[in-house]
Image (tube, helix red, strand yellow):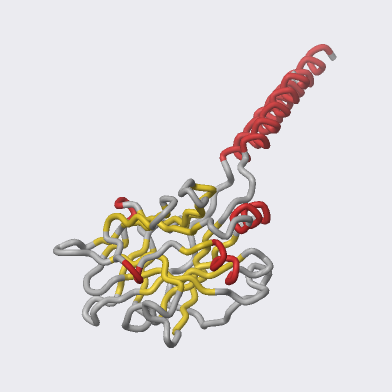
Amino acid sequence: MRFLCLGWASLVLFATLGTNSAPAADITFLNQTVDLNGTGFGNVYSLLALQATGSQTSEFGSVLWNGSMDILSGNAKPAIQTNTQPASIIQAITNANNHFGLIFNINQPGSNPNVVLHDFSLAFQDPNGGILFTATYNAPPGGIDLLQVDNGNGSAGYLFDVSLTNAEAALFFADPNNHLGQFITEANGITNVQGGPENFFLQSLGPDAGAGGGPDPGPGPGPGPGPHHMPEPGSLLIWSVFGACAVGFGARSLRRARRRSRAG
């Protein structure tokens, strides 16, 4: 039994190590706000602007590069408000730790200053429009309820930290004609919206962002602590196997002790 348990534990361990994904591009909500001047459309590296129409109460859409032009979908606003950005621009605002900033700006009337942000993704594309890799912000269940920071297009917002691995940065920045796009699915649309367009724009972070430093725009009224993280399924499986083996060994030892007691 001992060798059987050790064999199963080893198989599970190697299988788990083989299936665990390597570190990848990530988007982190910093729970910080920025309030900037001169950051309206045309003055920032705008990525995706969305505006609900008619009686819609959610916004979703995308901007992606197809090899020759930007392709917009859903509620994406056109022209200068929504653009994929070339790798040369992203490289210029990315620090030595492979981090850059993404700001989410809310533009709502005073009677309805809050929106709820759900999952969204950035698409790192090759010159022909193929997807090299993506980075996704996974919001907590129900999304994050955010209060408008400053009224107006692109004037202020909530800061997200986008981080790349060394391999991803090398791949994306190898060709200045690669592009960065963004998409929000209908199922993950920004909700409780009305009024002007919400938009995402890009900004550099401090040189030490990702290593304990970065900008200090001040705390925002964002959500509380995130959800408790359960161990990965692979970790649970490994400990389950070892636990089962331990129980088996214990039961076997107890039976041996009882036999010795009866024999004596």
Query: Residue 179 placed where, x, y %?
Result: 49, 58
Query: Residue 230 placed where, x, y %?
Result: 54, 48
Picture layout, residue 260 above or below residue 94? above
Taking depth in this image into account, of 89 and 23 the one nearest to the observer is 89
Q: Residue at x 28, y 62 (%)?
A: 191
| Relative to 73, 253 lies left or right | right
Q: Residue 144 sits in which quadrant?
A: bottom left
Q: Residue 63 sits in which quadrant?
A: bottom left
Taking depth in this image into account, of 158 and 134 the one nearest to the observer is 134
Picture layout, residue 17 above or below residue 23? above
Query: Residue 125 placed where, x, y %?
Result: 50, 52
Q: Residue at x 27, y 76 (%)?
A: 108
Taking depth in this image into account, of 122 and 215 the one nearest to the observer is 122
Q: Residue 237 sits in which quadrant?
A: top right
Location of the C terminus (image quadrant) = top right
Residue reaching furthest front? 68
Picture layout, residue 149 above or below residue 160? below
